[in-house]
Amino acid sequence: MTHTDIAIVGAGILGLAHAYAAAKAGKSITVFEKSPKSAGASIRNFGMVWPIGQPHGEMLGLSLRSRELWIELLTAAKLPFRNTGSLHLAYAEDEAAVCEEFAAVAPGMGYSCSWLDAAQVLAKSDAVVEEGSLGRLRGGLWSDTEFTVDPRQILADLPAFLAERYGVKFHFSTQVRTIEPTSTGNVVSSAAGPLHAETVFVCSGEDFESLYPEHFAASGLTRCKLQMMRTSPQPAVWQLGPSLAAGLTLRFYPAFQICKSLPALAQRIATETPEFDRWGIHALVSQTADGALTLGDSHEYGLAVDIFNKQEIDDLILEYTLGFLKAPDPKVAERWYGVYAKHPTKPIVTLWPEKRVRIVASPGGSGMTLSMGVGERSLKEMGLL
Ligand SMILES: Cc1cc2nc3c(=O)[nH]c(=O)nc-3n(C[C@H](O)[C@H](O)[C@H](O)COP(=O)(O)OP(=O)(O)OC[C@H]3O[C@@H](n4cnc5c(N)ncnc54)[C@H](O)[C@@H]3O)c2cc1C
């Protein structure tokens, strides 16, 4: 039987991150992906590596380590990324209060951010509306740690890089059907035939049914559906600059929960515009390598995902986004949805169905941000680094 040190189930970003960490350690690696090419959450996202959203302490530390590893990998693979930083824009008084409070305390906790007044924001970005449906710009929270990759390019090109540079073997269109423990490791069964693997990492995203369904069922994991849109490429002379977010996002990411001023903002939004809470909407804008803008998103939770998108959600996202985004061609060219695994309280779920099998799931809405750090940490915890 063929042997590999490490088998990985899933060629989403978590699977690829585990493959990268293991490849650098000189292990032999085989990756199985049931789709002909990656089609899960990783290719459907904004491509934002977004440490500013992580709560301080362990998760911020992990996201900053992940950021370092991402840049190391993108540089080695000669893949482009937009190292632009981010702006959370404040139009309402309570939004400015949260941003200013965060900027006052967060640098002492490891964030790299500051408050900018309206003139300073406008000097940083040509894409920001000075006065519009959200009111008059008061300023924004600037952070320099965020960058953007194009997920479609990354998910297509990273397997090729890992195969060429490190000899990682990929089996696409190959679903792993069973993983059986043996005295020396595991036998991984798929249409590619049996493979003996010392260690297996299962990075199967929101597929809770194919492998270890009883472990997933007991884990507390659920699914989250997000609606997304993309414009055509903008004219080359125009650049988004920093990725943009605004008041709705402040109530979304756990980082901002350290702000005493946050509950008032969340309460106002809940009272004035309950439709944003109903669909879990906040608005983010990133730019891809070809100049297109990615816009989103919403959050609908539950194991059964509605396969039909709601026009109301897209309309709400667009209306809000155009309150702060000024782009030459904001017309929507593509719409899709993505689904990720999410645990109500744990930022990442790890399960051990067998001694040398580790399921790594549920980085929720932060999988792109955390993936590289999580991959490295998993390998260390298994004694492989
Ligand atoms: C719309 C959207 C926007 C997002 N934006 C961001 C963002 O900007 N920044 C950020 O940090 N995070 C973001 N996220 C979250 C991030 O995309 C996810 O956390 C991350 O992609 C999860 O990666 P994964 O590898 O676990 O899952 P996936 O990408 O879903 O990959 C899992 C893979 O496993 C394969 N698979 C499953 N079972 C088997 C099997 N038995 N055999 C073989 N293959 C199998 C699947 O086919 C799939 O390709 C976003 C998510 C969505 C949906």
Image: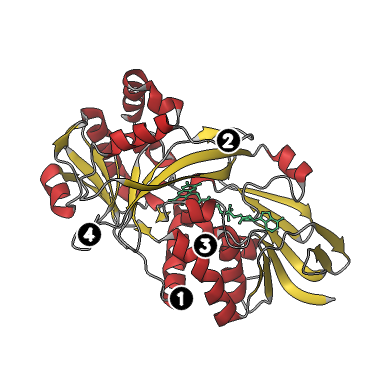
Where in the figure is residue 354, as x and y percent of width and height? 80, 55
Q: Give the SS element for disc 4.
A: loop
Q: Which of the two marks, 2 or 4, is nearer to us in this view?
A: 4
Where in the figure is residue 360, as x and y percent of width and height? 64, 53
Instruction: Determine the residue positioned at 10% across, 46% down.
Output: 119
Q: How far apart in space, not on screen, are marks 4 and 1 (Cα)?
A: 27 Å
Where in the figure is residue 249, as x and y percent of width and height? 36, 38
Check residue 111 in the rendering and tell me which mark sits there, or answer none.
none
Question: From this viewpoint, is residue 201 visible?
Answer: yes
The residue carrying pointer 1 sits among few (fewer than 14), some (14 to 19) or many (20 or more) residues within 10 Å by Cα, namely some
Q: Which of the two marks, 1 or 3, is nearer to us in this view?
A: 1
Q: Is residue 325 above or below residue 367?
A: above
Q: Which residue is mark 1?
A: 77
Q: Which of the two discs, 4 and 3, labels the residue nearer the N terminus? A: 4
Q: How far apart in space, not on screen, are marks 2 and 4 (Cα)?
A: 41 Å
The amino acid sitting under disc 2 is Pro
Q: Give the SS element for disc 3.
A: helix
Q: Which of the two discs, 2 and 4, labels the residue nearer the N terminus? A: 4
Q: Which residue is mark 2?
A: 344
The amino acid sitting under disc 4 is Pro
Q: Which of the two marks, 2 or 1, is nearer to us in this view?
A: 1
Mark 2 lies within 8 Å of ligand 1 (Cβ measured): no
The N terminus: image quadrant = bottom right
Question: From this viewpoint, is residue 281 visible?
Answer: no
Check residue 372 in the rendering and tell me which mark sits there, or answer none.
3
Q: Which of the two discs, 2 and 1, labels the residue nearer the N terminus? A: 1
Q: Which residue is mark 4?
A: 235
Q: How far apart in space, not on screen, are marks 3 and 2 (Cα)?
A: 22 Å
